[in-house]
Amino acid sequence: MEKLFEKAISVSDLCLTYGNFKVLDQVSFDVIKGACTIIMGGSGCGKSTLLKSLIGLLKPKAGHVLIEESDLWHASNSARQKLLRKCGVLFQGGALWSSLNILENLSLPLQTHTSLSEKEIKELACYKLSLVGLTGFEEFYPSEISGGMRKRAGIARAMILDPSIIFLDEPSAGLDPVNSRRLDDLINELKQSLGVTFVVVTHELASIFEIGDHSIFLDSSSKSLIAKGSPKDLLKNCEINEVQSFLQRKG
Ligand SMILES: Nc1ncnc2c1ncn2[C@@H]1O[C@H](COP(=O)(O)OP(=O)(O)O)[C@@H](O)[C@H]1O
Ligand SMILES: [Mg+2]
């Protein structure tokens, strides 16, 4: 019998606008639990906008976003905040607080959202830093570490409250190929060892094929989702021109 995959997120008939400007319409897809789903498409097609609607920052004009079967946008504010506690986010740019060291950056959400003691907070923050290979850099400030290390610290911070879903917007932007590759390895490791669900916006081809179990392709001219499937399957079987030229870029 076919295995039924559990859904972490289910999006149906989503329409996203900024005022009168429509970015996406009729978007429907599922995010499978414990897998990595890539949101891809050309610049300006609405990848970040879609992400914003999944993490509680942009109310859809129409449609539904279910997170673990609860409707994010048709819930009370308090229920929505509770749902969003399941989500960790690394924004495009991945800002850490520059005036706080790495340990303090990770401790802040724990101080705000938990009643753990300072000692417990420090232990937990150090543990998360160890998961992303940053043991020994606790006391460093963001400006004192490399771009790749800042991204990894950002991921550790996104994971600090033990989210079941982690959203990453262009995590490898600005990284050299070696660090970009290390970030992909980290995402795969965290997915396998912790069972975290990932939703990643990226247009880096190498990353798409390395980390993507599933993907959706957004298209700016039709303002809609035009393909979904595993990146490898789409490359092999999808006959849509936009998708093929995107996935076959050289370089
Ligand atoms: N805050 C905003 N207000 C108005 N338009 C926006 C805003 N953010 C993005 N847009 C527009 O929405 C479209 C999609 O943007 P975005 O989601 O950032 O694209 P992507 O992340 O795929 O590059 C673009 O045309 C962009 O100019
Ligand atoms: Mg974007």
Image (cartoon, helix red, strand yellow):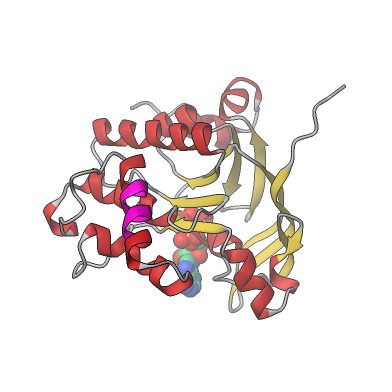
Evaluate whether residue 140 shows in this view: yes
Residue at the spot 26% in from the left edge and 59% down from the top edge: 103
Q: Quadrant of the N terminus?
A: top right
Residue 191: horizontal and vertical position, in percent? 51, 36
For residue 123: magenta?
Answer: yes
Residue at the right extreme?
A: 1
Evaluate whether residue 37 shows in this view: no
Q: Main secondary structure of the magenta part?
A: helix
Q: Quadrant of residue 175?
A: top left
Q: Of residues 202 and 113, which is closer to you in this image?
A: 113
Residue at the left extreme?
A: 144
Q: Of residues 223 and 15, which is closer to you in this image?
A: 15
Residue 105: horizontal and vertical position, in percent? 29, 63
Residue at the spot 14% in from the left edge and 58% down from the top edge: 143
For residue 101: magenta?
Answer: no
Q: Quadrant of residue 69?
A: bottom right
In the drawing, does residue 202 fall left or right of residue 58? left
Q: Quadrant of ligand 2?
A: bottom left
In the drawing, does residue 245 fall left or right of residue 21? left
In the drawing, does residue 48 fall left or right of residue 86? left
Q: How many numbered marks does the figure carry?
A: 0
Q: Quadrant of the C terminus?
A: top left
Highlighted range, magenta: 122-128
User: Is residue 140 positioned above or below 21 on the image?
Assistant: above
Residue 178: horizontal and vertical position, in percent? 25, 30
Residue 45: horizontal and vertical position, in percent? 52, 54
User: Is residue 122 positioned above or below 175 on the image?
Assistant: below
Residue at the spot 26% in from the left edge and 67% down from the top edge: 97
